[in-house]
Amino acid sequence: MFNGSSIETGQGLEFELITLSNGIRVAFRESFHTQIAHAGIFINAGSRDEFENEVGIAHLLEHMLFKGTHKRNSHQVINRLEVVGGDLNAFTTKDKTVVHASVVKEHFERAIELLADVTFNSSFPEKELAKEKKVIYEEIDMYFDSPDEQIFDDFQEHLYKNHPLGNNILGSRSSIENLHSEDLRKFVRHAYYANEIIVSVVAPISLKRVEKICRKYFESIVLPTGQINRVVPQISSTFDLLVEKQLSQAHALIGGNAFPLNHDKRPVTMLLTNLLGGPGMNSILNLDLREKRAYTYGVDCSYQALTDSGFFTIYWSTEDKNMKKSRKVILGLMDKLANDKLSETQLKKYKTQFQGQLIMAEESNSSMMFVIGRSLLDLGYVDSLNDILSRVQQITPEEIRDVAQELFKAENLSFLTYQPTDN
């Protein structure tokens, strides 16, 4: 266990870091010109940390945080912040559980007390658990009705074959139907470590008050310290799969392995995937597939980096008759990036756009709260915006080409296509 506590300034981005005596860390950044306080508890435990007989339990546990604590029933949990116009929510990822709240600053202590209560004092009542399973069954059914979501999870299942990262976060009916309250408590005991928890706060409140309130509600929490045992995924064999489904359109993914969070090529990969198929309507893929050829309503390229692995994907949907043609076009555009250097003028345009997106994202205090919490858990530091912008500015056409060559080579690419059965 940690003895005592400390206050220090974070590296890169300016924020205060308070380490409580039990090992939980509180990261605080003061915001101005706003009345809203944002706070979140970031736990370094997600679906990848489930045992074979627990698939879906991290997501189920997240739902159950709102179903009652040792001092509140579910109705009291729901209304605690809503009656003052606040918001309480949570989500589960492959490697994290996050519980967060936003309130008018006068109700900051109310939000922190509730966050601590639901996260560390939930009772997981069996009656509520039985009801919540039915809600999750509905969520699973809705998911299967959304091929644009399901295809990503199916792709990851094959990319991370025989590894927990390949499991669907929701689990399945069969995997969660036999889970009970004690199973949730067991998951907490084997996956939650105090030193792997960040309380992230971005609020128009003084450091002194934030520290006082967070100590009051978090310092008495008793959890072990240590490190969760995670198996690094192995690079699996590539695949090219065609799955028939009752759909009106074909859906497809092209993707492959990429770089983890701490890799020096990550910023280049972020810029590469952004210019190829990022949110801008002027991305290379959108201009060609949508604007020029009208093959698709939407196409995007994304890159996800974890602490020990990473992958990129290109997703689009189209009429079945245009699937082969659009796939050929996409591979051609990828090949062009891997073989032909962008001009300095082209790259400058893409850098300016990407940097603008990054600057606009920092304007949101809630987004900043999430950035701080995630980055501290994953990397142990938070890059300042100026550091990120500076690194992007230094990227050369040669770096873009070299990373494209590495990621887009044929032996690295996998394919998954949903083909309509009614065509």
Image: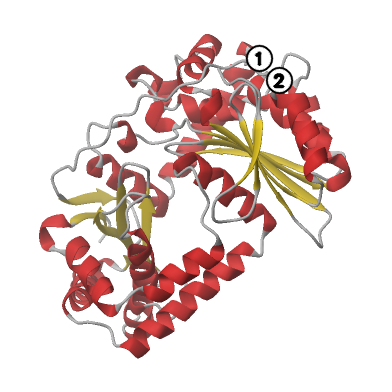
Up-down: is 311 above or below 250?
above
In this rendering, the count of numbered labels is 2
Q: Secondary structure at mark 1?
A: loop
Secondary structure at numbered mark 2:
loop
In the picture provided, is 366 more to the left or to the right than 212? left
The amino acid marked with disc number 1 is Ser
| Lateral position of residue 11 relative to residue 88, left or right | left
Identify the amino acid type marked 2.
Gly
Residue at left offset 53%, top offset 51%:
382
Gap between marks 2 and 1, in whole Å? 6 Å
Looking at this view, name the residue that lies furthest to the top: 182
Left or right: 101 as drawn, with respect to 346:
right
Give the position of the N terminus as an image quadrant. top right
- Proximity of marks 2 and 1: CB atoms separated by less than 8 Å: yes
Write the residue at 48% across / 18% down.
187
Q: Residue at x 50, y 15 (%)?
A: 189
- Name the image quarter holding residue 125: top right
The residue labelled by disc 2 is 68
Q: Which is more toward the observer, 3 or 77?
A: 3
Q: What residue is shown with label 1?
A: 123
Q: What x and y, as percent, mark residue 176?
A: 44, 21
Q: Nearer the viewer, residue 187 or 217?
A: 217
* Residue 281 is at least partly visible in this image: no
- Image coordinates of residue 131 in percent, x first then y, are 61, 21
